[in-house]
Image (cartoon, helix red, strand yellow):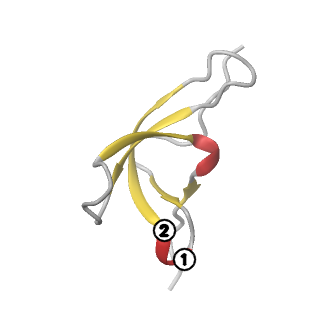
Amino acid sequence: MAIMPKFKPGQLVQWGQGPERLIGLVKSTQLARRRGEPVFVLVQWCGDKQWQQEEYVPQKDLKLVEEEKV
């Protein structure tokens, strides 16, 4: 039984907290093939050029960026 991803392409996600936080755009997701294996998300990072432009990140390390209500 595959573990399903909780993010969808086009959503903004964040990795880390505070000044070390990175924001990225979800480009695609990969199902976990077996229980115990992580779901991976392909993220295109925004901003800082020191980081790779795109990379696969385990889903458990990411949080959804929510809209700020005005």
The residue under the point 48% across, 37% down is: 41
Number of residue marks: 2
Helix, strand or loop at label 2? It is: loop
- Residue 52 in the figure: left or right of residue 60: left
How far across and down, in percent of the image, does residue 44 sit?
A: 33, 48
Q: Looking at the image, is 18 positioned above or below residue 1?
A: below
Quadrant of the image containing the N terminus:
top right
Disc 2 + disc 1, Cβ < 8 Å: yes
Name the disc covering residue 18, or none: 1
How far across and down, in percent of the image, does residue 23 sit?
A: 42, 62
Q: Looking at the image, is 62 positioned above or below residue 35?
A: below
Distance (Cα) linking label 2 and label 1: 6 Å
**Amino acid of disc 1:** Gly
Q: Residue furthest front?
A: 50
Residue that label 2 marks: 21
**Amino acid of disc 2:** Arg
- Residue 24 in the figure: left or right of residue 4: left
Task: Report which quarter residue 35 is drawn in.
Answer: top right
Name the disc covering residue 50, or none: none
